[in-house]
Amino acid sequence: MFDVTTLRKDFPILDRQVHGRPLVYLDSAATSQTPQQVLDAVDRFYTHYCANVHRGVHALAEEATAAYEHARGRVAAFTGGDPRGVVFTKNATEAFNLVAYSWAMERLGPGDVLLVTQMEHHANLVPWQLVQRHAGFDIASVPVTDEGLLDLDVFDEIVGSGRVKLFAVTAMSNVVGTINPVAELAQRVHAANDEAVVVVDGAQSVPHMPTDVHALGADFLCASGHKMLGPTGVGMLIARPELLERMPPFLGGGEMIADVTVQRSTFNEVPYKFEAGTPVIGEAIGLAAAIEYLDDLGMDNVRAHEEQLISACIDALTGIDGVTVHGPQDAARRGAAVSFAIEGLHPHDIGTIMDREGLAVRAGHHCAKPLVRSLGAVATTRASFYLYNTPDDIAALVRGIDATKEFFGVRNVR
Amino acid sequence: MTEDLYHDIILDHYRTPRNRAAELDGSHVHVHHNNPLCGDELDLRLRVDNGSIPTIDAVAYDGEGCSISMASASAMTEAVAGRDLADAEDLAQNFRAMMHGEPVEREDDLLDGIAFSGVAKFPVRVKCALLGWMALRDAISTFRDGQDSSRVVHEEPTL
Ligand SMILES: Cc1ncc(COP(=O)(O)O)c(C=O)c1O
């Protein structure tokens, strides 16, 4: 196991004060903080070998190309994928859109079902809705139970129809933390229809637990660099290369072509076919440094550390009068995004008072309105943890909740 | 800074709401406003004394939302009760100006509403403070149109 006190020194921002209080950062599910090692890697690119990639024959261009392709290899190794299947995008959202336009739009039509779940982030809902208007398939959804788990009976019923051609599911909920049994679900989807593909939203799972695309049964996996210690502006699609080969390009321009005449073009091989224009070079290099940082700690250790925090957090919160924790209560079944409600208080008020105490929590619908609605809420307050959080942060959260209740004069109910 | 947002008067209205009720005897118009982005829901009912100068005879609000939206609706009901419709609309205009950081002519008439001036410094919360006043304007125009109810969804801050 790693030592959190030592590791925190790698994150300059954690020394910051907010409104005169030490920052307690509990919003890593939205964006994680960046260690010095990542900042240095990006800095080194811009100060030593800043150049475009895959063009030019000069030394800088060669070094930049090598570093960029090294980053691709790191992403592949980190997720168990093939480098030829790794496409750099600007975020997870763009990766979903790529699959929507280059796969769903081409391969799905009337009579086919695209299955999502009620737990999905808008990034894993809206792109499908946009292409549905052109492709005319049906969208079905797996409901969420009161415990924040997928309703597997309904899942089996829909999949049993044999019509599901694409199943899009999150590996870990960004609102209630649920870890879904993706491997098992993917197996059932593939068994029911051998043409079906499974798209996994790894935006929350990839940063927080070990990932293996093959074990997950994912044909496509999407993730974002900024949630896993990397810079903003870089996301990843990890796909089976043979699927990418059969897909038309998503965006057109330089880099992605083999030959171009004024009338028509032939396309570059994968994954370059999907990286139109100058790619996210500095960002991908920063992401590679982030992955190196995570690999050095060991993803099993990251997960173990978070499981302890989650368990302590749920114990602490459920012990407070009037506080309810949404989603699974068992740390083993969930990730580090913990949404809660305080009876009689609105999340925006909670978030504002917490902010004055130096606590960065999130209040709102977390871009997952269907899920939040299913909780009977319009918004939740969410605290989310990462490898740099400590039990002290949980104590601060508890103090923040007490202060909020006190401030609004919510006396202990019942 | 927090004190600017959560002025004592605001907290007082939040903890001890005025004119908060799910029904209003003899109500002439009922409007339901909601803000799906933060989930605030507000019902406002007016009873109008329809004499030569139509006047707000009684007003009640009910709803669910953050402290700012609920307290502002509460303070609004006190400020407009007994005013004629045109006068109440003018007061709503004053409140809107205040929320946009503009000078206010009828400070005194806003009664406790003046306590919300600090909210102008928190742009994301301005729409919360405006919700009750927007509902009031809508209720008045709905009444004038001869209707008895309306439903409005606010996606973006308006008024
Ligand atoms: C589960 C999940 N999916 C997708 C996304 C979208 O990520 P991005 O905004 O980086 O594209 C997020 C981020 O909020 C998320 O939590």
Image (tube, coloured by chain):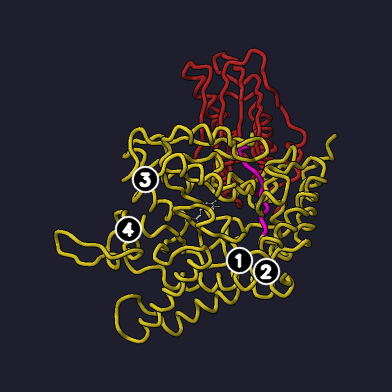
| Residue B75 marker | none
For the residues labelled 1 and 3, say whether their Cβ atoms are less than 8 Å apart: no
For the residues labelled 2 and 1, say whether their Cβ atoms are less than 8 Å apart: yes
- Quote the CA–CA distance across marks 3 and 2: 42 Å
Q: Quadrant of residue A249?
A: bottom left
Front residue (pair B65, B128): B65
Are discs 4 and 2 both within one chain? yes
Label 3 marks which chain's residue? A
Q: Which of marks 1 and 3 is in front?
A: 3
Q: Tag 3: residue type? A: Ala
Range of the magenta residues? A377-385
Q: Is mark 1 within 8 Å of ligand 1?
A: no
- Quote the CA–CA distance across marks 4 and 2: 44 Å
Q: In which quarter of the image is residue B75?
A: top right
Q: Is A383 a magenta residue?
A: yes
Of the image marks 3 and 2, the number of the one nearer the N terminus: 2
| Residue A33 marker | 1
| Residue A14 marker | 2
Of the image marks 4 and 1, the number of the one nearer the N terminus: 1
What residue is shown with label 3?
Answer: A104
Which residue lies at the image location 21% right of the left edge and 62% below the top edge? Answer: A266
User: Can residue A34 be seen at all in this image of the molecule?
Assistant: yes
As drawn, the residue found furthest toward the bottom would be A59
Chain A painted colour:
yellow
